[in-house]
Image (cartoon, rainbow, N blue to C red):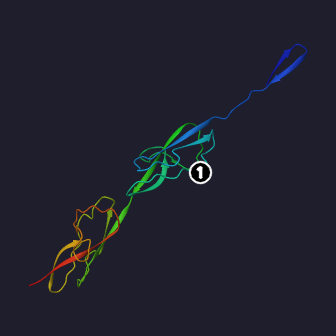
Amino acid sequence: GSTFTMGAADVTLYAQWTINTYTVTFDKNGGDTEANPTTKPAAHGGNVGTLPTAPTRTGYTFTSWNTETNGSGTEFTAATAVTADLTVYAQWTINTYTVTFDKNGGDTEANPTTKPAAHGGNVGTLPTAPTRTGYTFTSWNTETNGSGTEFTAATAVTADITVYAQWTINS
């Protein structure tokens, strides 16, 4: 402090400080829902205490918060020291699903019996079809009796699914 002379009495003055508080903004970065809450305060050099409830995105899994939209920055955690206003971005991993090919009465299995597909993607190529004595393989279908949707190499996959071999009897 500083000392000033004011007549007969000396007075000491002391500086008073207030710590800066910053705002961390949580950007959903392509998510379907927002983080909850979308902003959190942090005192200078402190942290946000707890992270918000993560946003959601159909077909993706939330993995972390990052200082860059593409994930090339620094991961932001509940313990990260905050020294300025900051926006962090949700990071996502696309979900991968399994398509199971059921021989549905066939004598042999499809080869392979399962194939992976990323959310909204497809299996690329169908497996080698199963065989069945006295029948000809005709297609894959989402229902055992063929009343569902035909499944092709180009069918978009949005969940784990089993498809069933469809057969025509030989004459």
Q: Which amino acid lies under the numbered mark 1 shown in the image of this protein?
A: Thr
Locate residue 110, reporting x and y percent. Answer: 25, 77
In the picture provided, is 53 more to the left or to the right than 46? left
The spot of residue 96 in percent (x, y) is 36, 63
Q: Is residue 28 above or below residue 61?
A: above
Residue with the mark numbered 1: 50
Q: Residues within 10 Å of mark 1 (few under 14, many from 20)?
A: few
Look at the picture and state if 92 lies above or below 104: above
Residue depicted at 42% across the width and 53% down the height? 92
- Percent across and percent down for residue 153 are 22, 65
Give how far across and how far down residue 103 sits, in percent. Answer: 25, 79
Q: Is residue 160 left or right of residue 2?
A: left
Q: Residue furthest left?
A: 171
Quarter of the picture containing the C terminus is: bottom left
State the residue at coordinates (60%, 49%): 79
Which quadrant would residue 139 be assigned to in this image? bottom left
